[in-house]
Image: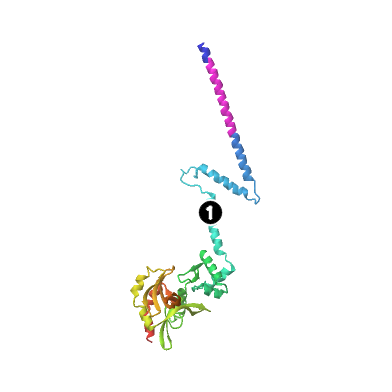
Amino acid sequence: HSRSFVFLIEVVMSDSCVAELDVLRAKKRSFALLEEETAAEEEDLVAAPDSDGAAASSLAVAVAVTKVPKLEHTLPGNGGGVDVADPEEASQPKEEAQQQQQSSSSTTPEETIVLSAISDGMPRKAQEIAKATKLEKKVVNSILYKLASRGLAVKHEDFTWTAKGAPSQAKQEAGAAGAAGPSSNTTAAKPENAVVALDTRRFVSVSSFHGKSLVDIREFYVDGGELKPGKKGISLTTEQWEKLGQDIDGVSNSLPGATKEAKTIVDLSAKRRLSVVNLGGGPRVDIREYYVAEKEGGALKPGKKGISLTADQWEKLIASTEAVNEALSR
């Protein structure tokens, strides 16, 4: 009986093992068929072009990219030390560089005209460029900012513009002086009666009007290749000029903390003041004539007659005191 029982157990176990093996074989065949179908679908997708005839190559790249993670982005046999580059990521810098080059190289006819007007190195304001190019000022402003965003134009502190890489006026004058020799007049670019240049377009001049000597601090503009006096500026009497330098330290100490509210440093006359102010473009030394605002209880308000100097221009103005005084004494 015991032998029969053992035999019966062996038969039952063998039958269950065979059934289990059959299940495993069926699963293996299912997985094999699934892999074959997947491979066939991938081949069909890669081989089939789209309407533009470009789907095959783009899809091949997509399939290749999806397979990269299986290799864990490393080359075989390198110990995992070298990353495999993603084709899409590698192409991005090249595409961005091409776009930047295209945007900087392609300019509209109007942009070309504006660029030509500022390519000589002489800083010019939008109004002067508009006059020279026969374009509206708002159009010129829009073009200038577009050129600046593409790295083709440069905006300066005094709201003037030059082309990117254009030689500065100072370099042009130096080059012309060197070419002409030691005897050339390096002040030929200055306006008549100009004693000191605060920058390429702002000058301190000494003149006489009705027998009175005046110190004129003024911004010039270019017209027909010549510098001509503009509206920005102020003419000081000799007494006002002397008062201008009375509190140099007060000006220097107040510049760093300048705000939108003008701070008076020196009263040059009853209606003229030297103040420091910062309207958002950096601290300025403002030399201006005020007017009485009757509608505001007779308060003094800043008028249009005057000029605002940067800290650098102010330092040059003070440094020119001796030269200006010498010109006044002639």
Image location (x, y in percent) of residue 251: 36, 73
Residue type at mark 1: give it. Gln
Taking the spot 54% from the left edge, 67% from the top edge, the residue there is 142
Residue 250, by quadrant, is: bottom left
Q: Is residue 318 left or right of residue 85?
A: left
Secondary element under disc 1, as helix, strand or loop, is: helix
Q: Is residue 197 left or right of residue 9?
A: left
Q: Quadrant of the C terminus?
A: bottom left
- Is residue 72 placed above or below 11 in the rendered structure? below
Residue 278, by quadrant, is: bottom left
Taking the spot 39% from the left edge, 77% from the top edge, the residue there is 273
Q: Which residues are magenta?
A: 7-31
Taking depth in this image into account, of 215 and 243 the one nearest to the observer is 243
- Is residue 270 placed above or below 150 in the rendered structure? below
Q: Which residue is mark 1?
A: 92
Q: Would you say residue 27 sits in the magenta stretch?
A: yes
Residue 275, by quadrant, is: bottom left
Taking the spot 56% from the left edge, 26% from the top edge, the residue there is 21
Q: Residues within 10 Å of mark 1 (few under 14, many from 20)?
A: few
Q: Is residue 57 visible?
A: yes
Q: Would you say residue 260 sits in the magenta stretch?
A: no
- Is residue 235 placed above or below 53 in the rendered structure? below
Q: In terms of secondary structure, what is the magenta stretch mainly?
A: helix
Q: Is residue 217 visible?
A: no
Taking depth in this image into account, of 125 and 116 the one nearest to the observer is 125
